[in-house]
Image (cartoon, grey):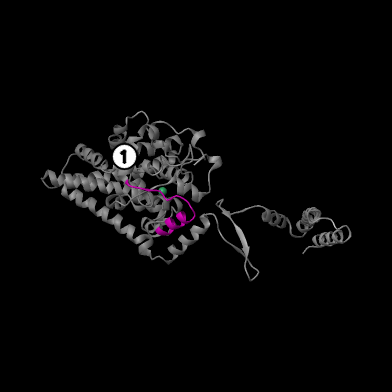
Amino acid sequence: MTQPTGLAICYGSLLLENNKTGTAELISVSSQVASFSVRILACLQYLHLFLKLPKMKQRNGKKVQQELVGKMLPKKDQNGDLISKTLVDSGGKTSFSRKDPSMVHLSEKIKAISQESSWWDLYGLDWTVIIAWELLFFIGVWLLSFPSQALFLCGMLLIGLNYGMIKTKASHLAAHNALCRSKSWAKFWKYFFIEFQGGFSVDAACDIHIKVHHPYTNILGLGDSSTWRAPFLPCYVYMFFAPLVLPLVTPVVGLGYLVQEKRFVRLMECLCLTVPGFVAQMLVIMYSSGLSALRTLLLILASRSVMEIPYLHINIFQHIGLPMYDAKDKPPRIRLMATGALNLTRNWLLDWNFGHSLINCHTEHHLFPQLSDNMCLKVKPVVRDYLLKYGLPYNEKDYSERLRYFIANYTDLMVKLPPVTEFAGLQ
Ligand SMILES: [Zn+2]
């Protein structure tokens, strides 16, 4: 019992003895005195705090002031996640419990899984898949040498599937340095898969995908996937025919980016890798199949379009139509990725040709882009449970469902730009 409250009760007792007033009057007077004393106490506490602050600041510098201010404000971690300080345990030590999802908290769980994983889990399985698709290229080239149209088509298909893997799985993992621990080898694989085999610019891939799309996923005007829109094209032309010209457009976009950025030295370096890479592929096919240079060129372009339709589809299915945010008012990273990315359900061909990180583990990939495809699959249950536990969405849709949805809502999703004032930050 505090001293002013005790005085109030004594004062009330005296009133009761001397004046014999009613109980109601006594309670009224007592409560007024108690209320007054609580206010006095509060004022004294604030006065004590502000008198103490300058002395502590002199003694320990700015850190003390920050600690005192920190006690009054909600704590945030480096990702902008709120940390709730809730109770003091029986041993007298302060304990923290989280009421809000935290990127740091989830990262600790994923880091523990990665540290316990073998090289096979971290990189080995993905390398096996990449090497298998590389071998299928040579099997495809060998099939071209048979005087059979069916075998010729099978050969083209395998060469096309190999390019699908190079353009997505291998180049994507290499761009994220997710193929090995060594920094120098990671750099080598980046140039090998993206420029030598893929015919695209490493600078363009890293600037567009790593520096913009990933940190600004679904931020309007930055990583909002609007570069995939072609509003002048009708729905079916865009969805099923336009992707077929991507093998011609892709190298031009990569080189054009370097010209636009005036990186002319890098442009020459890029040409020194992309041209020999393409010529080497042409010579291998010409030598094996006996085709002319022109027919080989047409065959390569045709085979490269084999996986371009699903490639365009996955790029729009996994982000467009989900909540979008203003750069000035974006949510914490974990919420941004949970609401702004979508996993497609498992599909054998797409999983192993494009990679789990681009298909059924896209949310995991946006949260932890340094993980290989196999590791994304391994941590998927942990990520899913964590997001759902803290009330965040875990978006999963089937490829065919997304296809029907985009065809039915093509005008809204792919033609009309979303009105900023209506969508930004409101979801
Ligand atoms: Zn990525």
In the depicted view, which residue is nearer to us: 127 or 332?
A: 332
**Residue 68: x %, y % from top left:** 71, 56
Q: Which residue is farthest right?
A: 18
In the depicted view, which residue is nearer to us: 229 or 212?
A: 229
In the depicted view, which residue is nearer to us: 122 or 301?
A: 122
Q: Is residue 389 magenta?
A: yes
Please report the bounds of the magenta region as a residue range: 381-398
In the rendered structure, the answer to whether residue 299 lies left or right of residue 63 reads: left
Q: Which residue is farthest top?
A: 232
**Residue 81: x %, y % from top left:** 56, 52
**Residue 220: x %, y % from top left:** 48, 38
Q: Which residue is mark 1?
A: 404
Q: Is residue 152 above or below residue 92?
A: above
Q: Quadrant of residue 128?
A: bottom left
Who's the residue at 23% across and 50% down the image?
Answer: 137
The quarter of the image holding the N terminus is bottom right
